[in-house]
Amino acid sequence: MISTDSLVRIALDLQLGISHQDRFHRLIQSVRSLLHSDASALLRYEGGQFIPLAIDGLMQDVLGRRFALADHPRMEAIARAGDVVRFPADSNLPDPYDGLIPDHDDFRVHACVGLPLFSDQTLIGALTIDGMNPTQFDGISDEELRLVGALAAAALSNALLLERLARQSSEPLAPSSQNGPGQPEMIGRSPAMDRLRHEIAVVASSELNVLILGETGVGKELIAKAVHQGSPRASAPLVYLNCAALPESVAESELFGHVKGAFTGAIHNRAGKFELADKGTLFLDEIGELSLSLQAKLLRVLQYGDLQRIGDDTPLKVNVRILAATNRELKQAVVEGQFRSDLYHRLSVFPIHAPALRERPDDIPLLAGYFCERCRVSLGLERLRIEPRALQLLGSYDWPGNVRELEHAIHRAAVLARAEQGSQAPALDCHHFNLATGSAPSSSRIPVEQAPQQITAGIGLRTATDAFQLRLIEQTLAAQHGNWAATARALEMDGGNLHRLARRLGLKP
Ligand SMILES: Nc1ncnc2c1ncn2[C@@H]1O[C@H](COP(=O)(O)OP(=O)(O)OP(=O)(O)O)[C@@H](O)[C@H]1O
Ligand SMILES: [Mg+2]
């Protein structure tokens, strides 16, 4: 039985929070003290998935996980119910939190209530309430649970409304908003990530060129996409060009196009990336690798807004916004004469600095959970959890390869754990993460001793071979600083075959 008093207290309490996050946290705390639940979560519903906003009694990595309805029958049941759902204690629907409650690896028989949250009859979220004791919530009526749900719905709907208003005045919004299951999302709640989101929102609405700086693997490409998506050009194309992957001989044609007969091999007229990006955005990745002569040509386009295809004198007008990214110290390259200072100044009107992962350790468990859930789906595992001590280990490592390295580490660990434990409910433990060796092997040759040793008999040659190949490729790739061509050479493999293998192993999309 819940007293009216305590409900009123929650309602008043919700007015006090200074930020949404704070308010959601208070709500979830009140649920615990009111219903004596062992685990609960407030989730927002968006694009076919539930996104945790606040949690209680659950592992920290849950905040980074996304629960797609298609993958989580319990969540789907809550989304479809229209009212309070009480799952029978012996329900055979898998629980999305199974294995994610500290010190309770097995979560088979328990009490579980789901409250769908609505605003104007639209599903906006859910509140899940779990208890270890199967009869824990029997004394609480549906009517009372509906009241709790109504309070949560009001708080959430209010927050969403404010966010929408803020968006209209181009204030920061959660870039998650265009995402659905499987779409990449920018994860992180640290102050550094909040600042980054704010900068993205501010610059996106302008027409300024943007220079995205940061170490390797910090998410510069993700930032470029977010800037484009948040800009008035969002419905026009975002054209990608990797300046490092361009041999000098084809770079100019890639950028500006050519006409038939302009050079040997020019058998058709061909538009360059600039033309393809007309009215949209051109993302020049690894801009620091562009040759000095191409820098000069690029500068001219930026200055005058027109260009010529190779072999053609007719000037073409283009309207293109440039986003450029590099993991080099571009300022230093200017000092050393490797990068034109006039181009640098044109590009760096608005620099965005992507923070290294070690500068925001609080985001590590969230990212780990996010990648874990993705691996779970892509590897077809029923559950996949990270042992608390492994999560601690991840938090204390300094991640020279940043988010990409973390993503690969989780993936590799998941493949190894599956090889060891089977695909039902593998758990990632410390020994699945060989972080020190993964980051900087001194030579590209990987000694056989570093092959996965924990693989036990009876897992099948195919799985074991996959695990070995995955580790070997990742270590070589790390040693070659992410350069696939060099990795193929070091492994004495054909580049195309390496790409196909890497895709099959899930190393590349
Ligand atoms: N905040 C984040 N949330 C979720 N995933 C992220 C985040 N940041 C980066 N990633 C993922 O990490 C990987 C590396 O990111 P990205 O390719 O954008 O790095 P980068 O900064 O361009 O690195 P490089 O300089 O090596 O090209 C990608 O798979 C990306 O989706
Ligand atoms: Mg990149």
Image (spheres, grey):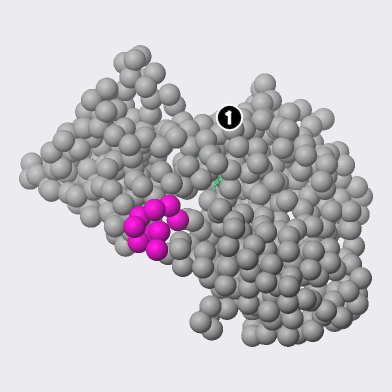
Compared with residue 56, is residue 329 higher up or lower down, i.e. above or below? above
Report which residue position mark 1 lands on. Answer: 480
Q: What residue type is labelled 1?
A: Gln
| 404 horizontally vs 345: left or right | right
Compare residues 419 and 278 and report the one nearer the observer: 278
Compared with residue 290, is residue 308 higher up or lower down, i.e. above or below? below
| 364 horizontally vs 496: left or right | right
Q: Is residue 82 visible?
A: yes
| Neighbours of disc 1 within 10 Å: few (<14), some (14-19), many (20+) | some
Quarter of the picture holding the N terminus: bottom right
Q: Where is residue 112 in the image (x, y as percent from the top left)?
A: 81, 74
Q: Where is residue 492 in the image (x, y as percent from the top left)?
A: 62, 34
Residue that appears at 63% across and 73% down: 151
Q: Which residue lies furthest to the left in this view?
A: 314
Q: Where is residue 61 in the image (x, y as percent from the top left)?
A: 71, 51
The stretch drawn in magenta includes residue 171: yes
Q: Is residue 216 visible?
A: no
| 226 horizontally vs 363: left or right | left
User: What number of labels is visible?
Assistant: 1
The residues colored magenta run: 165-173
Image quadrant in which you'd find residue 217:
top right
